[in-house]
Image (tube, rainbow, N blue to C red):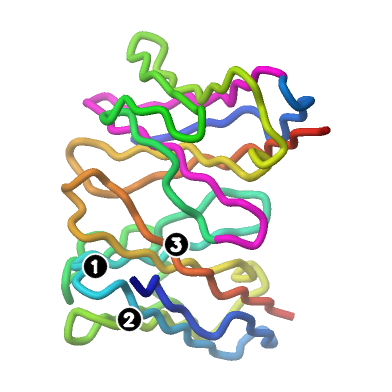
Amino acid sequence: AQRVTQPEKLLSVFKGAPVELKCNYSYSGSPELFWYVQYSRQRLQLLLRHISRESIKGFTADLNKGETSFHLKKPFAQEEDSAMYYCALRGDSSYKLIFGSGTRLLVRP
Amino acid sequence: EAGVAQSPRYKIIEKRQSVAFWCNPISGHATLYWYQQILGQGPKLLIQFQNNGVVDDSQLPKDRFSAERLKGVDSTLKIQPAKLEDSAVYLCASSLNPGVAGELFFGEGSRLTVL
């Protein structure tokens, strides 16, 4: 079964501090992993996907198959990064996108 | 480019009443999804359409929920009769092709409150 776990409901940091949003997954095949973000009063939108190995708004995420993790990182948090972040998984045998429960990131000035 | 449109944005009903939500996906997007997001939880997939066919409805409570996508464009999600636990935001999303990159484009959602 596909499962995504985000252990932290809330992560609060000060501006300029490093950020790591944790995501662990359960899937026996080859997963595709994504991070979606929802800013206040905006729609849920894609932030980044592991296959692109890209950095978006200073965020990066590396798929660690050994630890079944896909943590989202940023070296220096900005106030505008405050939002809800959802990790999502899609298995190779299905196009179903499964979301974690989300982590609220609060960046304080 | 116009985004995914949903209506109504808000709906308040009493339990055992019925409600319908409408979604218009981005033009040309073959895949349409309905997600249910209960407060404090992540979105849960209810049903996924590819054009006008159902790809996955394994988590749709079929005794009370129904969805259709006539002509492979707009979609309607209906709840009849509603229960208190159906209070949630119903998100519609679309994608160009589920096998390509996996990016879903979401609507603003329809917030349902069942009293």
User: Which SS class for mark 3?
Assistant: strand
Q: How far apart are marks 2 and 3 (CA)?
A: 13 Å
Q: Residue at x 42, y 35 (%)?
A: A3
Query: CB of mark 2 within 8 Å of CB of mark 1?
Result: yes
Along the line of sight, the residue nearer the viewer: A16 or B49: A16
Label 2: few (<14), some (14–19) or many (≥20) C-alpha neighbours in 10 Å = many
Q: Are marks 3 and 1 on the same chain?
A: yes
Output the chain of dot 1. B
What residue would you read off at disc 2?
B75
Residue at the spot of label 3:
B35
- Whether the magenta-drawn stretch holds residue A76 is answered as no
SS at mark 1 in the image: strand
Say whether disc 2 or disc 1 marks the residue closer to the N-terminus: 1
Q: Using the numbered discs, state the Cα–Cα distance from disc 3 to disc 1 in whole angstroms.
A: 12 Å
Q: Which mark is residue B49?
A: 1
Q: Which amino acid does label 1 sit on?
A: Phe
Q: Residues within 10 Å of mark 1 (few under 14, many from 20)?
A: many
Q: Is residue A6 above or below residue B60?
A: above
Q: Mark 2 lies on which chain?
A: B
Q: Which portion, as a residue range, is magenta?
A: A17-42
Task: Answer left or right for B18 relative to B98.
Answer: right
